Image (cartoon, rainbow, N blue to C red):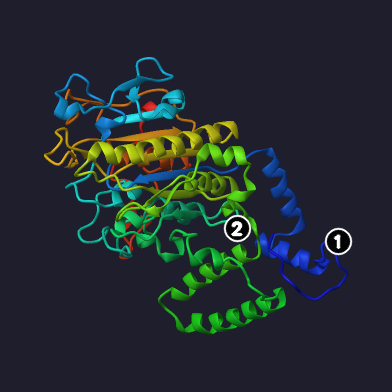
Amino acid sequence: MLTISGKTHGKFCDGVSRRDFLRIGGLAMGGLSLPELLKAEAEAKAGRSFKSVIMIYLCGAPPHQDMYDLKMDAPLEIRGPYKPIKTAVPGIHISEHAPRLAKIMDKLVPIRSMYGSPNGAHDSFICYTGKPPPPNGGAAPVGRLSDPPSFGSVISKLKGQADPAVPSFVGLAPKAGHPPYGSPGHPGYCGNTHAAFRPNGAGVEDLQLNGITLDRLEDRRSLLTGFDKFRRELDASGLVGSMDAFNQQALNVLTSSKLLTALDLSKETVKTRERYGKGQTQNYGDGAPLNLEHFLMARRLVEAGARVVTLNFGRWDFHDNNYPQLLKHLPLFDQGMSALVEDLHERGLDKDVAVVAWGEFGRTPIVNKDGGRDHWPRVGGALLAGGGFRTGQVIGATDKLGGEPTERPVHFGEVFASLYRFMGIDTVKTTLNDLTGRPQYLVDGWSPMPELV
């Protein structure tokens, strides 16, 4: 719990004064009155009032034909050495190295016919926007303000914060050797106010006041407000308004321990932490870490009030040694994803939290001379869960080689349209203005997937 010192006017048993207790509470709740606080509490008891999405980016694109779409009738150089196993849903088979996911297939939706990557270039952009990356834009270490925004930034702008003390959009993305592998999704023309909060490294330390008293914090805010009023009269760019939003968000986070508590995995039981596991905290090559604790952190964040959490996992670009590298990735993903989905169901969050896991494209049907699979933008795979979706079904199919979609091709944009609908946003009517003031649709003409309803 965050403790802030201040003037004493009668203290509670924990040493915090009544005056400071009320002031901290008011700040943390954005200045709500007591009746508003009581109303909010009553609404909270009545049930969760917001939806959340967890997006898992499998950096570098996993081999779909070795995970959800095994081709046992294909030649050895295509089908590989892995065997399919039965799942909880009769007729659905997946890799033998994903036994935990097989056991909860009734709670999952494998998509075997994903497409949409325009050229097979590595970029997280399409996984976070549903749109092909703009030329020389999405792959940049810092996205351009003229680019289309990521799903998390759109939700942040349109929906705001579900809890004033918790950022609407949180990105569990590390710094990576290949910048798109470390991107949580860029804000684009939504503006930096709606960029992902990234609680890694120094970001966590910045959540603590570190000796600054509540009175000093109030004095600084008053002084800053005075300067901003003066600057606002001179500023025609809107920058000061953006800074005001930053300041308010920072103040709400600083005056509540809720975000820090959500990031503190020690609050979980040993049994829960063991179920998720630890994985590997170091980056895998130039990609992201195989960090299983991020799956648990994602669940804690959406439970605390985050609307969108993105999670970057591993480095699946197996141009060589596909099978040995997959055995380092798939069993860990199997553990983390299954633990997350089961946990959401057990906590009654399966209808309020949607989960999607995917890479930017698929892999070649034929294994190359180095034992790897190369880029294959024609078709790939994805895995959906939660969201109140109709689970326990496979969507789409590929040919006998796993190289072309033969039934129900699914574009990234269709999944995004489905996720926006889940969040209560009509993609037919809703637009956002780009930097030129022109309205832009959230998805490029795609409709939500009827199979999920």
Nearest to the observer: residue 440 or residue 354 = 354
What amino acid type is highlighted by mark number 1? Cys
Please rate how many residues cluster around mark 2, counting C-alpha atoms within 10 Å: few if below 14, some from 14 to 19, many from 20: many
Q: Position of residue 254 (x, y in %)?
A: 62, 66
Nearest to the observer: residue 163 or residue 302 = 302
**Reading the chain from its start, which is encountered first: label 2 or label 1?**
1
Q: Please, what secondary structure does the residue beneath circle 1 have?
A: loop
- Residue 58 image-quadrant placement: top left
Q: Which residue is mark 1?
A: 13
Residue 261, compared with residue 373, is above or below; it is: below
Q: Position of residue 180 (x, y in %)?
A: 30, 56
Please rate how many residues cluster around mark 1, counting C-alpha atoms within 10 Å: few if below 14, some from 14 to 19, many from 20: few
Nearest to the observer: residue 37 or residue 28 = 28
The disc label shown at residue 260, or none: 2
Q: Position of residue 441 (x, y in %)?
A: 33, 50
Is residue 61 left or right of 338 when viewed as pictured? left
For the N terminus, give its image quadrant.
Answer: bottom right
Residue 64, compared with residue 38, is above or below; it is: above
Is residue 121 left or right of 200 when viewed as pictured? left
Is residue 8 left or right of 136 when viewed as pictured? right
Determine the residue positioned at 68% across, 38% down: 46
**Extreme-right residue of the structure:** 10
**Extreme-top residue of the structure:** 90
- Residue 220 image-quadrant placement: bottom right
- Residue 108 image-quadrant placement: top left
Determine if residue 442 is in view. no
What amino acid type is highlighted by mark number 2? Leu
Q: Please, what secondary structure does the residue beneath circle 2 have?
A: helix
